[in-house]
Image (cartoon, grey):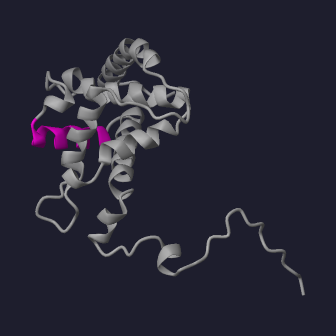
Amino acid sequence: MKRLYRRTFNQLSVLTGASVLTFPTAAFASQARGRAIELTDEERLLFERFTEVYLPTEGSSLKPLSEVPVIDNIAHALSLLDDTMLEQVRVGLKIFDYGSIVVGLHFARFVSLSEQDRVDYIQRWERGIEMQRGIVGVLKKLVCFGYWRDIEAGRAIGYPGPVSVVGKVPSLGNAPMPEGTNG
């Protein structure tokens, strides 16, 4: 049996306590699958602050964040999740945002931290326990999806667009797979 160290035990205790506090609010925020969901103001602000430090576009050839609907694209991605998964993601977002108060020892939410403190906090979660790495991984994937879903953002770095459009490949819809012969 693995030894449970005091620091790990304390982190797990705080995270468990934080998750218990957020479950009731996440349950009420649940939406039906396939319908457009509205991100709460807290969720929007969390994604905005995370995106600012995870995808810094100023001074680069990347399309500025202000011209890409990152948050709306993330909301679209979340609308594709079933209720249970959406609730779990929302709980993870709250744990990440409020975790900096106690676990991060910043005594402020993630969205209120300075830019450097946000970078340090993200890096700390990347090296943290499995749950922390999972939550920060979900945030990264959603932010990347939200940014790169905009085809024009890709064109800023030389991506010509979908191969099927560039190559003028006709759409066959839901065509059946061709039947092969074993000659």
Residue name at image x 14 percent, y 29 percent: 112
x, y percent for residue 142: 38, 45
Stretch of the chain drawn in magenta: 114-126
Residue name at image x 16 percent, y 25 percent: 105
Which quarter shows the C terminus? bottom right
In the image, taking residue 178 as reference, residue 41 lies left or right, namely left
- Magenta-drawn stretch, dominant element (helix, strand or loop): helix
Residue name at image x 35 percent, y 58 percent: 150
The answer to which quarter of the image holds residue 19 is top left
- Between 60 and 67, the residue placed more toward the observer is 67
- Between 7 and 32, the residue placed more toward the observer is 32
x, y percent for residue 108: 15, 23
x, y percent for residue 116: 11, 43
In the image, taking residue 182 as reference, residue 118 lies left or right, namely left
Would residue 40 be counted in the magenta stretch?
Answer: no
Relative vertical location of residue 8 with respect to residue 126 in this rendering, above or below: above
x, y percent for residue 40: 32, 26
The answer to which quarter of the image holds residue 111 is top left
In the image, taking residue 173 as reference, residue 77 lies left or right, namely left
- Between 27 and 17, the residue placed more toward the observer is 27
**Residue 137 visible at all:** no
